[in-house]
Amino acid sequence: MTASGYSYVFLGPSITSPRGDERATTYSGLLRALVDRGHTALFLERDEPSADGDPAASRRGEVARYASLEELKDRFSGAVRRADLVIVGSRVPEGAAIGAWVTGEAGGRAAFHDLDTPVTVRELATGQHEHITPALVSRYDLYLSSTGGPAIELLERRHGAVRARPLHCGVDPELHFPEPTACVWDLGHLGDYRDDCHGALERLLLRPARLLPRSSFAVAGALYPAGVDLPANVSRLERIPAGAHRGFHGAQRFTLDVTPRDAADVGHSPSARLFEAAACGATVVSDGWPGIDAFFHPGEEILIARSTEDVLRLLCDMPDRARAAVGRRARRRVLAEHTAAHRAEALERYTREVLDAGSRRRGGGGLGGQRGAVLRQRRCSDG
């Protein structure tokens, strides 16, 4: 820990690309909040052929790119050794190899930040180890999971995580806020196409659209197959930049949030898109999942619809004043509990916890070798 706070190194997906997917907006907000709270943060992203953003233009801390694992080691070994906490994100290319290097190289502590915990748990069980291996789970000093609830105990007891802690997605209020816009659609959905979400999308948006031909609907996102049957009153929009999300939400009476099957089965997995929509004051309709009431009060701050008939009742019977009040209450809840600043505060607590505890990555006997000497020296110099 430096005089100005903790030093963090993140290895994650691109946050400088204008595509602005959920992982990028989650990390962007978190880094901004950490810097605002007096910490230093270096974010390392893979230099993909499609990466067209400008790292130098980032206001979220220092951002740098690497083209290969070899370049990562050559250029950033020093930063990894000096950091208090090095955090490897899920779904990073060559994630398992990077994790093996980080857990051996880090002079402070190493953490895995899983923004896809239900998928990771399934892949661990089925032998898919591109991003993290069963042995690597226990080498990390800290396992940060975007899924809470029973998954935390599962990660520790079944998969050997030393310290599993919830770190849900958060929202950046500087980017997501109500934007007054003329109402264009009665119900819209923002999210890339997924096979395991399409059944819910059909049941909760496309079928209501067919039954209400005079109402207007919208589906926005990438990867939709050309053969997807959309009714004539459903507008099809491609991926919307992160800065335009609030305008999209503001142009709807209701916003539909659909949960991937893995996340719905495990529960306790709020998405970044859900928090973003609520922060924009949108009236969110969710397909519901176990644990949702820990984040929003159903019926007061979020609306649950499990059938076409549920959606039809909301669209046709709910008064506008009551509908808008749900969105206002959801926004208040997000600002009170679910911003990037709240997640940064939680990460601070976890960092303090893991720095104060002995490392178990090398057999459970505390810190040893160069890594232990470096950290002990840093603690003594910090007083």
Image (cartoon, helix red, strand yellow):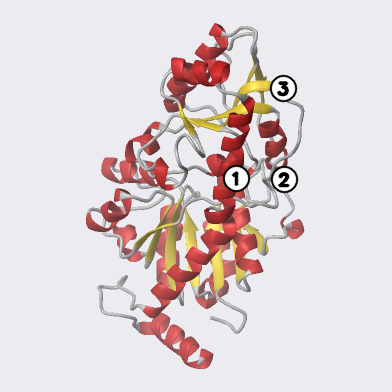
Residue at figure coordinates x 41%, y 43% from the top left = 293
Tag count: 3
Which residue carries the number 1 mark? 331
Which residue carries the number 3 mark? 184
- Badge 3 marks a residue whose secondary structure is loop
**Amino acid at dot 3:** Val
In-front residue for pair 345/212: 212
Q: Position of residue 177 (x, y in %)?
A: 69, 45
- Badge 1 marks a residue whose secondary structure is helix
In-front residue for pair 39/320: 320
Which residue carries the number 2 mark? 52
Nearest to N terminus: mark 2 or mark 1: 2
Residue at figure coordinates x 45%, y 16% from the top left = 308
Q: Position of residue 329 (x, y in %)?
A: 57, 43
From the image, state whether disc 2 or disc 1 is nearer to you: 1
Give the distance between the C-alpha atoms of the residues marked 1 and 3, in whole angstroms. Answer: 21 Å
